Image (spheres, rainbow, N blue to C red):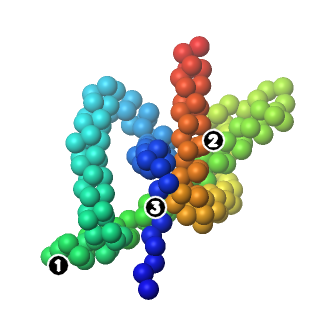
Amino acid sequence: METKRASWASNLGFLMAAIGSAVGLGNIWGFPYKMGKSGGFAYLAVYALLAIFVGFIVMASELAMGRKTGQGAMGTYHALTKKFRWIGWLALFSPFAVMGFYAVLGGYCIEYMALNLSNFAFGSESLATGGELFAAMLSNPAGAVLFAALFLALCYLINRSGISGGIEKFNNVGMPMLFVMLVIIIIRSLT
């Protein structure tokens, strides 16, 4: 009996998920610092060239291989080559390695947002600065564990609904919200 694989309901949903994957928390969190420390526009130019000429090519290659074989990452490499079958195992291991980093980073983002919102909503006459809130957050390891677990639970709930019902729906709302937040931050930084 052959099982039907889940698929994207629309090209826009796939595009939003691909953009969300490319942008990622790591880039939002670390990119401004890295760009400022590593040469500004020169760093941005090299980054953009690598994203276009390496990232796009790798993504297009993976999509083409997946479409040709109709299988997941491990099955694709097993079907296409005997010499490089082991790359399929890397494709299986990589998300677990990345998720270890992302769970902590996502938890920090949720905790920092919660601290800022509570500071703003329930703050006293003198609101704590962003640096003070960040230092308080880093000195609370129990909070880091709690918010990392919350981040993992949110990821589970989104993924539980599948590709079109979970990931695609979330990205169709989340990516435009991210863009709006970016515009607000740009406007705020200019005023």
Q: Tell me where residue 168 appears, x and y as whole percent.
A: 53, 52
Q: What numbered label is drawn on residue 29? A: none
In the displayed structure image, the side of residue 97 where residue 42 appears, left or right: left
Q: Residues within 10 Å of mark 3 (few under 14, many from 20)?
A: few
- Look at the image and tell me in which quarter the N terminus lies: bottom left
**Residues at marks 3 and 1, CA–CA distance in whole angstroms:** 28 Å
User: Tag 1's secondary structure?
Assistant: loop
Q: Quadrant of residue 95?
A: bottom left
Q: What amino acid is at disc 3?
A: Ser
Of label 3 and label 1, which has the lower sequence position? 3
- Which residue occupies the extreme bottom position in the image? 1
Q: Residues within 10 Å of mark 1 (few under 14, many from 20)?
A: few
**Residues at marks 3 and 2, CA–CA distance in whole angstroms:** 40 Å
Q: Tell me where residue 139 appears, x and y as whole percent.
A: 65, 51
Q: What amino acid is at disc 2?
A: Phe
Q: Residue at x 24, y 49 (%)?
A: 57
Mark 1 lies on residue? 82
Q: What numbered label is drawn on residue 7? A: 3
Q: Tell me where residue 135 appears, x and y as whole percent.
A: 63, 43
Q: Are marks 3 and 2 in contact (CB under 8 Å)?
A: no
User: Tag 2's secondary structure?
Assistant: helix
- Which residue occupies the extreme left position in the image? 83
Q: Residue at x 59, y 37 (%)?
A: 177
Mark 2 lies on residue? 134
